Image: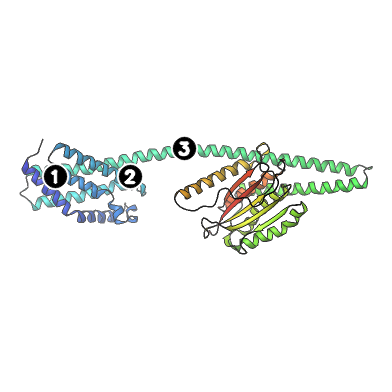
Amino acid sequence: MAQDPRAGGELAAVASHFAARRDELLERWREAADRDPQLTTASALSRAQFYDHIPAVLDAFERRLRAQRRDEKAAAADDQREGAAGHGMHRWQHGYQQREAMREWRHLQLCLVDELEAFGLAHPELGTGAMSTARRALAELCSEGVCESADQYAQLQQAQAAGRVRDLQRALAALGDLETRRAATWREAAHDLRGTLGIVKNATVTLDHPDAPDGARAQTLSTLQRGVAAMQALLNDLIDLARLEAGQERRETAPFDAAALLAELCLGTRPLAAGRGLALAATGPATLPVEGDRLKTYRIAQNLLLNAVRYTERGGVAVRWAPDPGDESARWVLCVQDTGPGLQAESAAPLAQALKAATEEAQAVGDQAEAAGKPSAEAEPAPLLRSQSAPPSREPAGEGIGLAIVKRLCELLDASLELHTERGTGTTFRVIFPRRY
């Protein structure tokens, strides 16, 4: 049903007045919010961010005043509610507390009410019906705005709470998995210590035998020395791992040349590789200035390199370093590849699954970067060495402890660790370090 033509014309005049005064009204609203000591978040917003959906809400309000038919009024009211809900979402996303959003609506309502009353005083010829309708429409505008914003906050808080529950469930599951892997690591360490202790015990029995020939004594003594050295190395690794897990290690950063560090490590390891009949290739730029923890970077590279040399039966080991092709100024890459038996499922070191998960996460990040048009380092490096496939063999004792230390050190240095392994072909570890912190 159409409204009275005279009242319709007066309401249209009110709407035109509000449209003409739009900029001044919005500015007065912002000034009122700036003066409110309880509104602190608004100061971080630009003018456009502060106004947000409110100009569209005022457009709908003015259309509602001009509307002649009921369906036109209903459509304008729907637009008002939609704009108010969007404004509530915007304020949530910018870190507003719900009370802050409500106080902003209060200031807006006061500005609009003052403007309407001033217009009424300046135009005494307006009928009481038109002014009453305009006041009611204004009250509905602001009350709907408050309700819609509050409803958006309630829905978003529920969604956030549900998300937190899911995060806690995942964290608990991850914690359980971590404890399982940690227990497996320590069980393997205990098994290795017991095995090495058995070797030492047998050697001492042989040495204590009065009729043992000199050749057997010399061989047994050598076995005893190797067993003691292995036990000492394993105990040292366990102490290092315990310190890392207890959070007793700290990152100490300073500039250093990663290329010189790695070249020195490879030079010192080459005799060990040669003694096992293995080639050791080291490639990379002559200098690679970075900022980081030199000692912990050396420990990561040393653990990976020594594992590769000790557990490779034929072929060789390659060490490569270079700036990350995806972002040369921000990251650099260390790659250690061997032609050994690979990490095998039936005798998997406890860290194999953890490293696999870390690799999948790193690859997922790389896929997302590529989808956004950003280059990223390859998840699966091209082979550096090729040799005849080595026969499958059991992963030597203690490898899991060394890999656990590497993973913990990488976490400490904000470095990502990637693993690619194939049974009988070899294993490649890639560590992506920040070039600065």
Q: Where is mark 3, residue-wise?
A: 166
Question: Separation of disc 1 and disc 2 at Cα?
Answer: 28 Å
Question: Which is closer to the viewer, label 1 or label 2?
Answer: 1
Query: Is 392 rendered above or below residue 436?
Result: above
The amino acid on which the numbered mark 2 sits, given as a three-letter code, is Met
| Count of marks placed on residues | 3
Q: Position of residue 337 (x, y in %)?
A: 65, 50
Foreground pick, 357 / 421: 421
Provide residue 230's location: percent of width, then percent of height. Answer: 76, 47
Q: Residue at x 81, y 49 (%)?
A: 225
The amino acid on which the numbered mark 3 sits, given as a three-letter code, is: Arg
Disc 1 crowd rating (10 Å Cα; few below 14, some 14-19, many 20+) is: many
Mark 3 element type? helix
Label 3 crowd (10 A; few <14 / some 14-19 / many >=20)? few
Which mark is on residue 66? 1
| Horizontal arrangement in the rendering, residue 71 relative to residue 399 (left or right) | left
**Which x, y percent locates residue 434?**
55, 56
Image point (85%, 43%), residue name:
203
Identify the secondary structure beneath mark 2: helix
Q: Sequence order check: which comes first, mark 1 or mark 3?
A: 1
In percent of width and height, residue 251 lies at 58, 56
Looking at this view, name the residue that lies furthest to the top.
Answer: 1
Circles 2 and 3, Cβ within 8 Å, touching? The answer is no
Residue 318 visible somewhere in the drawing: yes
Which residue position is annotated with label 2?
A: 89
Foreground residue, 151 or 74?
74
Tell me which amino acid carries mark 1: Arg
Would you say 357 lies left or right of 127 here? Answer: right
